[in-house]
Image (spheres, rainbow, N blue to C red):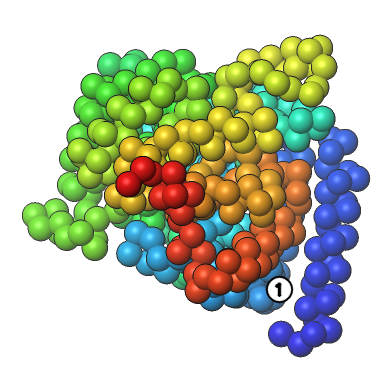
Amino acid sequence: MALGSRVRMIAAMAIYQLLFSAVFRRVPAEAAHQLALGLIRCAAAVPGASWLLRRALAPADPVLRVHVFGRDLASPLGLAAGFDKDAVGPDALGALGFAFIEVGTVTAEPQVGNPRPRLFRLPADRALVNRMGFNNHGAAAMAARLRSRQHRDPRLLVGANIGKTRVVPDAAAAADYATSAALLAPVAGYLVLNVSSPNTPGLRNLQAVDQLRALIAAVRGAVRDAEPHAAQPSASSRVPLLIKIAPDLADEDIDAIADLALELGLDGIIATNTTVSRDNLASSPAEVAATGAGGLSGAPLKPRALHVLRRLRARTGDRLVLVASGGIETPDDAWERIEAGATLLQAYTGFIYGGPLWPRRICRGLSARARAAGLASVQQAVGVTARAATPR
Ligand SMILES: Cc1cc2nc3c(=O)[nH]c(=O)nc-3n(C[C@H](O)[C@H](O)[C@H](O)COP(=O)(O)O)c2cc1C
């Protein structure tokens, strides 16, 4: 792209960033979110705009490339689940510079989620509290959208995150997940079993090893049946299967889940979802109380999410793809997670507070760090601090 158009594009995004700070933060958080997603989709729908956005914002530095799940991604940075719950705009979001987008959480049945307001900002903590409760159009609608993606970017990895339909009793949870998995396996780049949202009663109990084992077996069976050559599924045609865990697990539960993931040959673990803890917040107790129940995300989650990641890496080494999520807001945070063992990174709240140029900033920072360390690829840094800490 010519330098002039590149500068104009960056200037336009900077104006958008100003708008984001000045206007979006003054309207209710969920309305701001919907407006932002709508604007991003509109911008990307203008003919040629996605291409221009990608040229200006998507990482092009080869040092950022990672090889994961049998494919090459432009960078390790992705957008976490919950931002595009229904897969209405993964390619538009990808054009901002994310190498992968996790859509969902989606459930087998469409549902409205919890009553509003259900999303709150705690700006003093650069945090959010949400109790959305899996508002979504259902797995069949998502599968149809993913099948007919407009302005499809073939390099973008789109994973689908699955949860339990609220009205389905806990005893039937596995079948409910399996229904969604069967619908989405043929059209998703990977599947995530979300067993860690605090906003669906009983969901986090699925993290108990026996429950998880049954859940994974049911989902595996459904995915096998849904795949085109069910009789001889090859490793390459198989959709990667991951689980997403909570930051509030005890250390021994983290270890048990890691062991189970290895035993069952899962492809990866996402650590972590939001926390129910409200410890160590800078916001006043009254502000915190006003947000009510729900999952806290953003900067305060950083230490706990990093701890869980380190624990998983210590237990599993390089045998699983670890995806870091929780409080990543600066290039230093991103680099620290990679060095702690994350092959992939995801963010939600950092992007909300950082605005549309945020992915570009993180990627540029990661490039600089990899080059300063004399590495040919960021992937060479995965787990280096974990390796250094392992006694020989
Ligand atoms: C408003 C909101 C909605 C979310 N919805 C989902 C969801 O549907 N499924 C899920 O697995 N995680 C969901 N999350 C959690 C994020 O994917 C992410 O794991 C978590 O926020 C920690 O990352 P962060 O600190 O970068 O936000 C949601 C987070 C927020 C803030």
Q: Is residue 114 visible in the rendered structure shown here?
A: no
In the image, what residue occupies the spot 29% across and 53% down? 239
Nearest the viewer among 375 and 354 is 375
In the image, what residue occupies the spot 33% across and 29% down? 255
Q: Residue furthest right?
A: 22
Q: Residue furthest bottom?
A: 2
Per the image, the residue denoted by label 1 is: 56
Residue 101 in the image: x percent, y percent?
Answer: 52, 53
- Residue 226 placement, left or right of 283: left
Nearest the viewer among 384 and 92 is 384
Question: Secondary structure under badge 1?
Answer: helix
Relative to 42, residue 155 above or below = below
In the image, what residue occupies the spot 52% across and 70% down? 375
- For ligand 1, the image quadrant comes to top right
Q: Residue furthest front?
A: 392
Residue 334 in the image: x percent, y percent?
Answer: 60, 51
Q: Is residue 289 visible in the rendered structure shown here?
A: yes
Count of marks overlaid on the render: 1
Residue 195 in the image: x percent, y percent?
Answer: 40, 29
Name the quadrant containing residue 171: top left
Nearest the viewer among 179 and 245 is 245
In the image, what residue occupies the spot 44% across and 44% down? 389
Amino acid under disc 1: Ala
* CB at disc 1 and ligand 1 closer than 8 Å: no
The N terminus lies in which quarter of the figure? bottom right
- Residue 208 placement, left or right of 231: right
- Residue 5 placement, left or right of 197: right
Within 10 Å of the Cα at label 1, are there few (<14), some (14-19), or many (20+) other Cα atoms?
many
Residue 269 in the image: x percent, y percent?
Answer: 39, 41
Relative to 40, residue 325 above or below = above
